[in-house]
Image: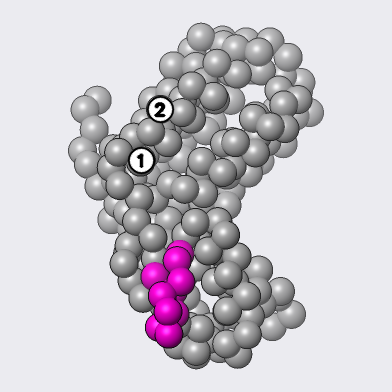
Amino acid sequence: MASHIGPVAAGSSLRITVEEALASAIVSGELAPGTLLTAPTLGARFGVSATPVREAMLNLQKRGFVETVRNKGFRVTDVSEQDLWEIVRIRQLLEVPAMRDIARTLQPYTATQLRAQADLIVEAAASADIPTYLAADVDFHLTLLRLTGNERLVELVRDLRQQTRMVGLADLIGSDELARSAAEHHQLMDLLERRDGRGAQQLLHSHIEHVLGWWSGRTETQ
């Protein structure tokens, strides 16, 4: 898998680009928990000055991805197995029940938009574009939840996802597991468009469970 950390394209917002690249590297396990990061070193890798990198790191600190280390820089934070288990269980409690209402009210125009996002997830998985995969995955699930009309629910799930680590993701590049997980977004849309709320709930429950399985480098039973 190509590194998330590399020269930044001209004309992009340096702070935002650097922040999201680092977030993807941390979530996917490229930057492992405990890794020490410095603005000058990262700036050299991104081909930018230390200033936007430092601004990005401060934002990542607020999001819980890193912590400051006095006179040294920033350290990538860890998420324990218990933390991850709790995050997954809370997400299942919050997201799964919403599928029944969404199945009853989903409109064709919105379904088309969600299908386009699902296509992007599948394409990113096939091309090993992990930053795009992660961003599209977040967009898909939050767009889906936004159909409930409950922005607090959306923000709670967004925050929980930002606390997640998927340290096994790098090893899944090109695997059947990654392709199957990506395809589940279209399968979920099939169920929702058929008004099968119960089926959508069951699929989403197992889909979120991947965080404790494939995404953590563990084999899942079929």
Q: Residue at x 48, y 21 (%)?
A: 93
Q: Residue at x 57, y 59 (%)?
A: 62
Q: Amino acid at mark 1?
A: Leu
Toward the viewer: 15 or 200? 15
What is the basis of the colouring in this image? one colour
Position of residue 212 measured from the top left corner of the image (x, y, whole percent): 31, 37
Quadrant (top left, top right, bottom left, bottom right) of the N terminus: bottom left
Q: Is residue 208 placed above or below 177 in the rendered structure? A: above
Residue 39 covered by magenta stretch: no
Q: Residue at x 30, y 38 (%)?
A: 82
Toward the viewer: 96 or 50? 50
Residue 94 seen by the camera: yes
Q: Callout 1: helix, strand or loop?
A: helix
Q: Is residue 68 left or right of residue 213?
A: right
Dot 1 crowding, Cα within 10 Å, few <14, some 14–19, many 20+: some
Q: Earlier in the sequence, mark 1 or mark 2?
A: 1
Q: Is residue 76 placed above or below 191 in the rendered structure? A: below
Position of residue 145 measured from the top left corner of the image (x, y, whole percent): 65, 29
What residue span does the magenta drawing correspond to? 66-75
Q: Is residue 182 left or right of residue 219?
A: right
As drawn, the label of residue 89 is 2
Dot 2 crowding, Cα within 10 Å, few <14, some 14–19, many 20+: few
Which image quarter: residue 104?
top right
Position of residue 142 measured from the top left corner of the image (x, y, whole percent): 63, 37
Q: Is residue 68 left or right of residue 104?
A: left
Toward the viewer: 93 or 166? 93
Q: Is residue 107 placed above or below 10 in the rendered structure? A: above
Magenta: main secondary structure: strand
Residue 25 seen by the camera: no
Residue where numbered disc 1 is placed: 84
Q: Amino acid at mark 2?
A: Arg
